[in-house]
Image: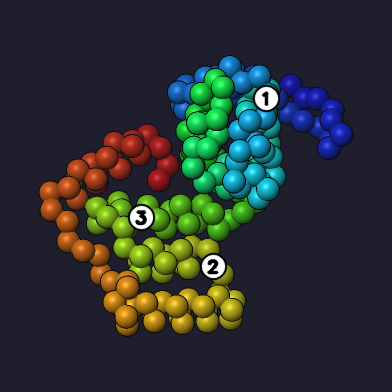
Amino acid sequence: MQYESKSGTVTCDPGFAGRVKDESGVDFNRCYQCLTCTLGCPVARYMDHPPSEIVRMVQLGLKGQVLGCSTIWVCASCESCVTRCPNEINIPRLMDALHQMALREGVKPKVAVVPAFHAAFMDPVRRFGRQNEALMSAEHFLRSRDFSPKTLKVAAGLGIGMVTKGKIKLLPARTGKGKDQVKHLFKETLKGKKP
């Protein structure tokens, strides 16, 4: 279905809300737009749509607008909204499900470095069973494709200084049997999904 709005034609997907509810496990239909989540959100000013608006857009089936917005990537998952929501709607879980849907459907976010950071953060965990700052930083640098002189100077200056002072280790620490368990979790999570 299509509707005319101030910003142009809006396409609604009537099954979108149901799919989001099934995937996230969040009952967002209890939201009555009190705006408590938005008022308590520490990063709302960096979002193109505040959390309360995202909930309403999901309810209305505005799939294209929701999956293409930067809000689902900017959410810090701090859970301030959940603790203050009178209906205990888990917005971080909703945001996580939405950005996973966006990744699977190949929707390019407006803020390209955020998904690059997510991927760079999780890759060392998947490969080694724990985080490694040097690998994460290098992978984020390559994935974000920001090779400006300013970025190179900061990356080289901070990175080399932290390695020489022993603040960051170049290689990840060895893990015991937990490494296989983490790999198994990633394998089970990604079954049937695009990596």
Q: Earlier in the sequence, mark 2 or mark 1?
A: 1
Q: At numbered mark 2, what does the secondary structure look like: helix, strand or loop? A: loop
Residue at 68 percent across and 48 percent down: it is 45
Picture residue at 54% right of the left edge, 67% below the top: 145
**Can you say which quadrant of the picture contains the N terminus?**
top right
Nearest to the eye among marks 3 and 1: give it.
Answer: 1
In this orientation, which residue lies closer to the viewer: 123 or 86?
Answer: 86
109 shown above or below 162: above
Q: CA distance from mark 3 to mark 2?
A: 17 Å
62 sits to left or right of 23: right
Three-letter residue code for mark 3: Asp
Left or right: 191 with respect to 150? Answer: left
Which disc, if any, is residue 34? Answer: 1
x, y percent for residue 79: 49, 37
The residue identified by callout 3 is: 123
Residue density around tag 1, few if under 14, some if 14–19, many if 20 or more, within 10 Å: few
Q: Do the residues bearing badges 3 and 2 touch, measured as CB atoms within 8 Å?
A: no
Instruction: Name the element at disc 3.
Output: helix
Residue occupying the point 50% across, 31% down: 83
Q: Are marks 2 and 1 in contact (CB under 8 Å)?
A: no
Mark 3 Cα-neighbour bin, 10 Å: few <14, some 14–19, many ≥20: some
Amino acid type, residue under disc 2 in the picture: Arg
Q: Is residue 66 visible?
A: no
Residue picked out by circle 2: 145
Q: Are marks 3 and 1 in contact (CB under 8 Å)?
A: no
**Residue that extends furthest to the top in the rendered view of this protein:** 30
Q: Earlier in the sequence, mark 3 or mark 1?
A: 1
Q: Report the residue at 59% width, 46% height from top.
A: 42
- Specify whether 90 is left or right of 61: left
Residue 26 percent location from the top left of the image: 49, 23
